[in-house]
Amino acid sequence: MASELKRQFDTDGFCVIENVIPADKIDDVRKQVVQVQSEHAADSEEEMKKTRSRGHRIGNKGVGNLRQVINHTQSFAPYLADRRIMDLAEDLFGSYVRISCTDCVINYPGNDRGYWHADWPFNQTNASHVVAPYPDVTMHLSTIWMLTSFTAENGGTLAIPGSHRSARNPSGGDMEEVDRDAPYPTEMHVTGPAGSVFVGDSRLWHSVATNLSDAPRVAMIVRYAPWWLNLNPTMIGTPEHTQMVVETGGKNYEMELIRPDVYEKLPDNVKPLYRYCVG
């Protein structure tokens, strides 16, 4: 199984691992994530408005989110160090893997389609990003946790298999041969049953898909980073974030620190993933 996942990851730039969150636990996890996102929706929208007012393209109409959702519910924490995910991450990065993002995202019916991009540090709209052309090296893993089943109808994330091998991506709008807002000939929906986890190379071209169903599509975004990747530009208050984001008026993925009381309650095998960012 492990070798097949690695083969798929190397070839397509992603793989899907099923049953990471057990079937008898998924409903409770989803309900708790939806509840805390709803409770903090106003704060999230206010942050989006501030960023948009500076002229940046961020977020999609009809998509709700909450950064560092683990500060608000730890219902999913026991599964973050699933051995299949960690084996893949450690095969790519070695020991001392860290989690660099734990956000929830809810695509409501009729949400807007997104634009083709790669995730930080390869998204060229971010104030801090790796300058293209990129070396052919996996530097960051982006995972999408399916708290509801992902289908083509309900907006399973759009991805372009093999695009992680490209030395560039369309996020900056400077690839004249690619319309970053238009369908791509080889695009596909990422699908899987609730409890599954999509694991992708952060260079992979992907896009928010429109939810054509009548129910929200609920997910979490969890990213795994090697110890050697500098995450300081994403952390408010660090010199790199001040210099690269605040002083330039730019936009960036911004990570909230883990509260000490939350950290202390995490499973022992999950604590090392967050140890570096306890507030």
Image (cartoon, grey):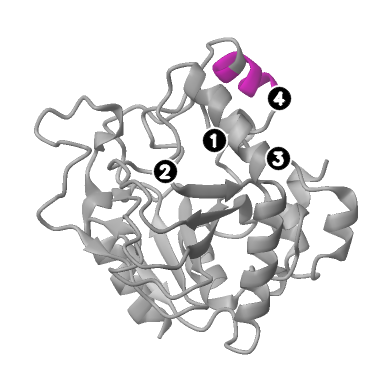
Question: In the shown orientation, is residue 228 left or right of residue 56?
Answer: right
Mark 2 residue element: loop
Observer-side mark, 3 or 4, equals 3
x and y, in percent, of residue 237 in the image: 73, 24
In the picture as drawn, the residue positioned furthest to the bottom comes out as: 24
| Distance from Cα at disc 4 to Cα at disc 2 | 21 Å
State which tag comes first along the sequence, 3 or 4.
4
Residue 46 lies, with reference to residue 150, above or below; the image says: above
The N terminus sits in image quarter = bottom left
Q: Name the residue under label 4.
A: 238
State which tag comes first along the sequence, 1 or 2.
2
x and y, in percent, of residue 95 in the image: 61, 60
Q: Name the residue under label 2.
A: 119
Which residue does the image show at 66% across and 73% down from the upper left?
29
Dots 1, 2 in contact, CB < 8 A:
yes
- The quadrant in which residue 193 appears is bottom left
- Magenta residues span 238-245
